[in-house]
Amino acid sequence: MKKSGEPTTTLYIRNMVCNRCIRVVREELEGLDLQIQRVDLGEVNLLNGKGIDLKKIRSVLEENGFELIEDKRVRIIERIKLAILKLVQHDHSVSVLKLNHSDYISRELGHDYHSLSTLFSSVENITIEQYIILQKIERVKELVKYGELTLSEIAFKGGYSSVQHLSNQFKKVTGLTPSHFKDLKKSLRKPLDRVTSK
């Protein structure tokens, strides 16, 4: 437990997209005898961060498919992606999914949306809105493949205004209707850390 005035160091880590990633990062960093206050998607708070060996941390993270982010601009972009991932991949009330995306991202990062949007587009060559759509479509693919929900339920769960809206967006991105996609034997889903227009 953090004592008042005890120094902490925050590490920012790329490719942490799930609870398993959190567990792996925690175990690996504890294996380096680091005192961990908190591990979240993309972020680790260390107690007594003075004198930590970043080279060792970088090495152990890379062995597990993660990457230590040291560039401030890249950190912000990674935080935007994680905020979007949390919004799209996790079950929320419909009111959260229907929130204005700019308000949600601005609130999550504590920064002006316009500056976040400009930075994201300049580095990623895709707008935040386009990235959100790509993430939503990956989520729809996942739910369609599971086959546990109707398209109406998936549309509702994803915050779409209608099945038609979902179907149109799905076809625009994938070139397929959701039902055609469901019939495909081979999964066309992408790893979440690879979702981009590039």
Image (cartoon, rainbow, N blue to C red):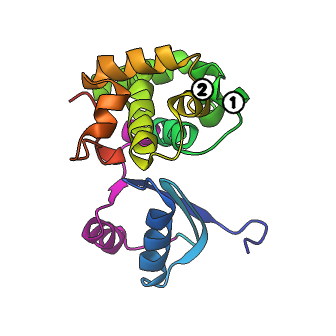
The reply to whether discs 1 and 2 touch (Cβ–Cβ < 8 Å) is yes
Residue type, numbered disc 1: Val
Residue 58 part of the magenta segment: yes
Q: Quadrant of residue 180?
A: top left
Furthest toward the right, the residue is 4
The foreground one among 106 and 4 is: 106
Q: Quadrant of residue 7?
A: bottom right
Q: Can you tell which mark lies on residue 159?
A: 2
Please tell me whether mark 2 sits on a helix, a strand or a loop. loop
Q: Quadrant of residue 38?
A: bottom right
User: Residue sitting at 36 percent across and 30 percent down?
Assistant: 179
Residue type, numbered disc 2: Gly
The foreground one among 152 and 168 is: 152
**Structural crowding at the residue carrying mark 2, measured as other residues with C-alpha within 10 Å and reported as few (<14), some (14–19) or many (≥20):** many
Above or below for 66 versus 82: below
The foreground one among 175 and 79 is: 175
Q: Can you tell which mark lies on residue 94?
A: 1
Query: How far across and how far down the image is residue 61, in percent?
Result: 33, 67
User: Residue sitting at 42 percent across and 25 percent down?
Assistant: 133
User: Residue sitting at 27 percent across and 65 percent down?
Assistant: 62
Query: How far across and how far down the image is residue 37, in percent?
Result: 63, 69
Quadrant of image for the C terminus: top left
The magenta segment is 50-78
**Structural crowding at the residue carrying mark 1, measured as other residues with C-alpha within 10 Å and reported as few (<14), some (14–19) or many (≥20):** few
